[in-house]
Amino acid sequence: MGRRLVPLTLDNLQDLPQRCRSCVFWELDPVSGEAAIQGGSAAQEKEGWISAVLLDWGSCGRVVYVDDVPVGYVLYAPPAYVPRSAAFPTSPLSPDAVQLITAFVLPGYQGQGLGRVMVQTVAKDLLRRGFKAIEVFGDARWKEPACLLPVDHLLAVGFKTVRPHPSHPRLRLELRSTLSWKEDVEMALDRLLGAVQKEPALRPL
């Protein structure tokens, strides 16, 4: 089995699930996001967002391929590039952290260590760029696939709550801790990355 982790660019954006390519939940503020959806410009807004972040900040995602088939991805950026983050009651994120926007591994490919390798790859990238942690807004009342990851699963892979909230606590993962992850983390991480979508096909978060 050949597997590759490739930086997300405009060239491989089409390898994300079709609906994910036009999802702007995080990339725009709530009002602008709704306007883009109603106006049919969400896909263009998504492409424009990725282009702007790449030019201004650098790599903001990874796509995972197994035998040249895209089977997962992760998206991340400083909160300044994620307008929706300001709408959460537990914002702002810490100045030394990057926001985990979304991450996913196709269910049929879970249990193979892809999730762990993906997060470790992101950790190495961010450590090299001077960041110390990943932070994320969790969903404490998670019941079904959505744009937020379930708090229980985040805690299971090492995130710690840094600002409690009954619905959307903010959690933090120290990047250096990911570099020493062992196999016992793998199953929990698979549950985390698989929680956003349980159907056997990649779809939006």
Image (cartoon, grey):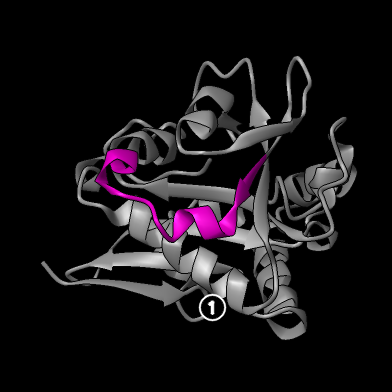
On the picture, is 31 further left or further right than 168?
right
Residue at left offset 34%, top offset 41%: 185
Give the x, y percent position of residue 188: 36, 34
Residue at left offset 81%, top offset 45%: 85
Residue at left offset 30%, top offset 43%: 186
Q: Quadrant of the N terminus?
A: bottom left
Q: State how many labels appear.
A: 1
The answer to whether residue 111 is seen in the rendering is yes
On the picture, is 165 further left or further right than 141?
right
Residue at left offset 85%, top offset 48%: 29
Say if the magenta span includes residue 173: yes
Q: Which is more toward the observer, 49 or 137? A: 137
Magenta residues, start to end: 172-186
- Characterize the local packing of mark 1: few (<14), some (14-19) or many (20 or more) Cα atoms within 10 angstroms: some
Vertical position of residue 177 compared to residue 146: above or below? below
Give the x, y percent position of residue 124: 51, 71
Q: Mark 1 points at which residue?
A: 9
Q: Which quadrant would residue 50 be assigned to in this image? A: bottom right
Vertical position of residue 126 compared to residue 145: above or below? below
Give the x, y percent position of residue 105: 35, 48
Vertical position of residue 30 compared to residue 62: above or below? above
